[in-house]
Amino acid sequence: MKPGIHPKYEKTTITCACGAVYHVGSTVKNIRVEVCARCHPFFTGQQRLVDTGGRVERFMKRYAQVTEK
């Protein structure tokens, strides 16, 4: 490798919203994530519905008329 052109590779921590903490090597310090292997539905087997701003209700209201006809 050429000296001085590559980013510095350091030990860092990845913190998930569920509280899990992972120590890995990265060029970025202190990474925060919303979903990790401990809380992701694929790995846990539990479905989580994230409703942002009532999108599910708006969808159901919009397409309820179509199902009635």
Image (cartoon, rainbow, N blue to C red):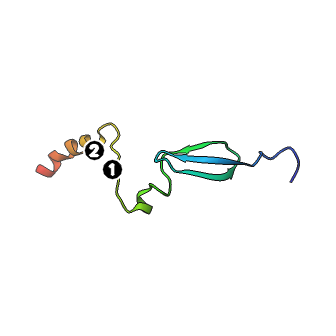
Of marks 1 and 2, which one's residue comes earlier in the chain? Answer: 1
The amino acid pointed to by label 1 is Leu
Q: Residue 24 or 62: which is nearer the viewer?
A: 24
Evaluate if marks 1 and 2 touch, with contact meaning CB atoms under 8 Å apart: yes
Residue 39: image location, x then y, percent:
44, 54
Number of residues whose C-alpha sits closer than 10 Å to that of mark 1, classed few (under 14), some (14–19) or many (20 or more): few
Q: Quadrant of the N terminus?
A: bottom right
Q: Residue 60 or 31: which is nearer the viewer?
A: 31
Residue at 50% over, 53% down: 36
Q: Which residue is mark 2?
A: 56
- Determine the image quadrant of residue 46: bottom left
- Determine the image quadrant of residue 56: top left
Specify whether 46 is left or right of 27: left
Q: Which residue is mark 1?
A: 49
The amino acid pointed to by label 2 is Val
Residue at 77% over, 45% down: 8
Q: SS of the residue at dot 1? A: loop
Residue 52 appearing in the image: yes
Specify whether 20 is left or right of 61: right
Q: SS of the residue at dot 2? A: helix
Residue 69 appearing in the image: no
Label 1, label 2: how far apart the Cα atoms are: 10 Å
Residue at 17% over, 48% down: 66
